[in-house]
Image (spheres, rainbow, N blue to C red):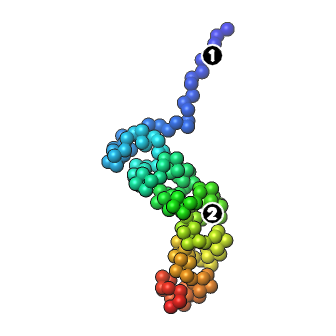
Amino acid sequence: MATVRHRDRRDLTVSPPPDAYELAEARGYGLTASDLRQWRPLSAIEIHWARKHGLSPGVARRWAREGVGVSDAVRAVKLRISPEQVRPWAAAGFLPGDAVEAAETGMTLAEATAWRQVGFILPDAALLVRDGWTLDQATVARFAGVDRYAPAGE
Protein backbone atom coordinates (compact mmCIF):
# COMPACT_ATOMS: atom_id res chain seq x y z
CA MET A 1 0.00 0.00 0.00
CA ALA A 2 1.36 3.40 -0.96
CA THR A 3 1.53 6.07 1.64
CA VAL A 4 0.11 9.41 0.76
CA ARG A 5 2.22 12.36 1.68
CA HIS A 6 0.47 15.47 2.85
CA ARG A 7 2.16 18.75 2.51
CA ASP A 8 2.51 20.46 5.86
CA ARG A 9 0.14 23.34 6.18
CA ARG A 10 1.58 26.65 7.15
CA ASP A 11 0.44 27.90 10.51
CA LEU A 12 -1.86 30.78 9.59
CA THR A 13 -1.58 32.32 13.06
CA VAL A 14 2.07 33.17 12.42
CA SER A 15 2.35 36.50 10.68
CA PRO A 16 4.45 36.75 7.53
CA PRO A 17 7.85 38.42 7.80
CA PRO A 18 7.86 42.18 7.23
CA ASP A 19 8.53 43.34 3.69
CA ALA A 20 11.41 45.64 2.76
CA TYR A 21 9.34 48.82 2.88
CA GLU A 22 7.91 47.97 6.29
CA LEU A 23 11.35 47.11 7.63
CA ALA A 24 12.88 50.34 6.28
CA GLU A 25 10.14 52.37 7.93
CA ALA A 26 10.62 50.47 11.20
CA ARG A 27 14.35 51.11 11.19
CA GLY A 28 13.59 54.82 11.01
CA TYR A 29 11.93 54.45 14.42
CA GLY A 30 14.71 52.27 15.83
CA LEU A 31 12.70 49.05 15.47
CA THR A 32 13.79 45.64 14.24
CA ALA A 33 11.98 42.91 12.33
CA SER A 34 11.35 41.03 15.58
CA ASP A 35 9.74 44.17 17.02
CA LEU A 36 7.37 44.28 14.05
CA ARG A 37 6.46 40.61 14.50
CA GLN A 38 5.96 41.05 18.24
CA TRP A 39 3.70 44.09 17.89
CA ARG A 40 1.62 43.02 14.85
CA PRO A 41 -0.88 44.28 13.60
CA LEU A 42 0.43 47.73 14.59
CA SER A 43 2.46 49.77 12.12
CA ALA A 44 5.91 51.16 12.89
CA ILE A 45 4.59 54.59 13.86
CA GLU A 46 1.94 53.02 16.10
CA ILE A 47 4.60 50.87 17.78
CA HIS A 48 6.74 53.96 18.29
CA TRP A 49 3.88 55.84 19.98
CA ALA A 50 2.75 52.83 22.01
CA ARG A 51 6.27 52.37 23.38
CA LYS A 52 6.65 56.08 24.03
CA HIS A 53 3.49 56.07 26.15
CA GLY A 54 4.28 52.82 27.96
CA LEU A 55 1.88 50.35 26.33
CA SER A 56 2.98 46.74 26.28
CA PRO A 57 2.69 44.72 23.04
CA GLY A 58 -0.16 42.64 24.46
CA VAL A 59 -2.21 45.64 25.56
CA ALA A 60 -1.64 47.44 22.27
CA ARG A 61 -2.66 44.33 20.28
CA ARG A 62 -5.83 43.89 22.39
CA TRP A 63 -6.90 47.45 21.69
CA ALA A 64 -6.01 47.15 17.99
CA ARG A 65 -8.28 44.08 17.71
CA GLU A 66 -11.16 46.27 18.99
CA GLY A 67 -10.35 48.89 16.34
CA VAL A 68 -9.04 51.46 18.82
CA GLY A 69 -6.00 53.45 17.74
CA VAL A 70 -2.90 53.88 19.88
CA SER A 71 -3.70 57.40 21.09
CA ASP A 72 -7.18 56.33 22.22
CA ALA A 73 -5.71 53.15 23.75
CA VAL A 74 -3.26 55.23 25.81
CA ARG A 75 -6.14 57.39 27.06
CA ALA A 76 -8.22 54.29 27.81
CA VAL A 77 -5.43 52.67 29.82
CA LYS A 78 -5.06 55.87 31.86
CA LEU A 79 -8.84 55.86 32.50
CA ARG A 80 -8.73 52.14 33.35
CA ILE A 81 -11.15 51.21 30.58
CA SER A 82 -10.94 47.68 29.24
CA PRO A 83 -11.41 46.74 25.59
CA GLU A 84 -14.50 44.76 26.62
CA GLN A 85 -16.16 48.02 27.70
CA VAL A 86 -15.82 49.34 24.14
CA ARG A 87 -17.79 46.53 22.50
CA PRO A 88 -21.29 47.78 23.46
CA TRP A 89 -20.40 51.17 22.00
CA ALA A 90 -19.34 49.58 18.72
CA ALA A 91 -22.54 47.51 18.70
CA ALA A 92 -24.53 50.76 19.10
CA GLY A 93 -22.83 52.18 16.01
CA PHE A 94 -20.25 54.46 17.61
CA LEU A 95 -16.65 54.61 16.46
CA PRO A 96 -14.25 52.64 18.69
CA GLY A 97 -12.51 55.73 20.04
CA ASP A 98 -15.85 57.34 20.93
CA ALA A 99 -16.23 55.17 24.03
CA VAL A 100 -12.91 56.45 25.32
CA GLU A 101 -13.83 60.06 24.57
CA ALA A 102 -17.20 59.68 26.30
CA ALA A 103 -15.61 58.01 29.33
CA GLU A 104 -13.30 60.99 29.76
CA THR A 105 -16.34 63.24 30.19
CA GLY A 106 -18.40 60.74 32.20
CA MET A 107 -21.05 60.10 29.54
CA THR A 108 -22.92 56.82 29.50
CA LEU A 109 -23.90 54.95 26.37
CA ALA A 110 -27.53 56.01 26.85
CA GLU A 111 -26.57 59.68 27.12
CA ALA A 112 -24.34 59.46 24.05
CA THR A 113 -27.15 57.81 22.11
CA ALA A 114 -29.55 60.60 23.13
CA TRP A 115 -27.07 63.26 21.96
CA ARG A 116 -26.67 61.42 18.65
CA GLN A 117 -30.44 61.15 18.13
CA VAL A 118 -30.72 64.93 18.42
CA GLY A 119 -28.03 65.32 15.77
CA PHE A 120 -24.75 65.86 17.63
CA ILE A 121 -21.65 63.85 16.84
CA LEU A 122 -20.01 62.35 19.89
CA PRO A 123 -16.77 64.37 19.95
CA ASP A 124 -18.82 67.59 19.93
CA ALA A 125 -21.26 66.22 22.51
CA ALA A 126 -18.39 65.17 24.77
CA LEU A 127 -16.88 68.67 24.58
CA LEU A 128 -20.23 70.22 25.41
CA VAL A 129 -20.84 67.88 28.36
CA ARG A 130 -17.33 68.59 29.63
CA ASP A 131 -18.10 72.32 29.49
CA GLY A 132 -21.33 71.89 31.46
CA TRP A 133 -23.96 71.90 28.71
CA THR A 134 -27.10 69.78 29.03
CA LEU A 135 -28.70 68.21 26.00
CA ASP A 136 -31.62 70.66 26.11
CA GLN A 137 -29.33 73.71 26.38
CA ALA A 138 -27.15 72.52 23.53
CA THR A 139 -30.13 71.79 21.27
CA VAL A 140 -31.66 75.23 21.86
CA ALA A 141 -28.28 76.95 21.47
CA ARG A 142 -27.57 75.15 18.21
CA PHE A 143 -30.78 76.41 16.65
CA ALA A 144 -30.23 79.90 18.08
CA GLY A 145 -26.74 80.08 16.54
CA VAL A 146 -24.87 80.28 19.86
CA ASP A 147 -21.14 79.46 19.81
CA ARG A 148 -21.02 75.86 20.95
CA TYR A 149 -17.69 76.21 22.73
CA ALA A 150 -18.76 79.10 24.94
CA PRO A 151 -19.36 78.15 28.59
CA ALA A 152 -22.92 77.02 29.27
CA GLY A 153 -23.70 79.83 31.74
CA GLU A 154 -23.00 82.68 29.29
Instruction: Say which amino acid is labelled 2.
Output: Trp
Indicate left or right for 67 with 4 as reference: left
**Image location (x, y in percent) of residue 121:** 56, 73
Image: 120 above or below 36: below
- Determine if residue 151 is in view: yes
Q: Which of label 1 and label 2 is nearer to you?
A: 2
Residue 49: which quarter of the image?
bottom left
Q: Mark 2: which secondary structure?
A: helix
Look at 55% across and 72% down and name the residue there.
Answer: 105
Instruction: Say which amino acid is labelled 1.
Output: Val
Q: Are marks 1 and 2 in contact (CB under 8 Å)?
A: no
Look at 43% across and 56% down and name the residue there.
Answer: 53
**Image location (x, y in percent) of residue 140:** 59, 88
**Image location (x, y in percent) of residue 148:** 50, 83
Closest to the observer: 154 or 93? Answer: 154
Residue labelled with disc 1: 4
Image: 129 above or below 144: above
Residue labelled with disc 2: 89
Q: Mark 1: which secondary structure?
A: loop
* Label drawn at residue 90: none
**Image location (x, y in percent) of residue 146:** 50, 88
- Label 1 Cα neighbours within 10 Å, binned few <14 / some 14-19 / many ≥20: few
Q: Residue at the left extreme? A: 28
Compute the Cα span from label 1 to label 2: 51 Å
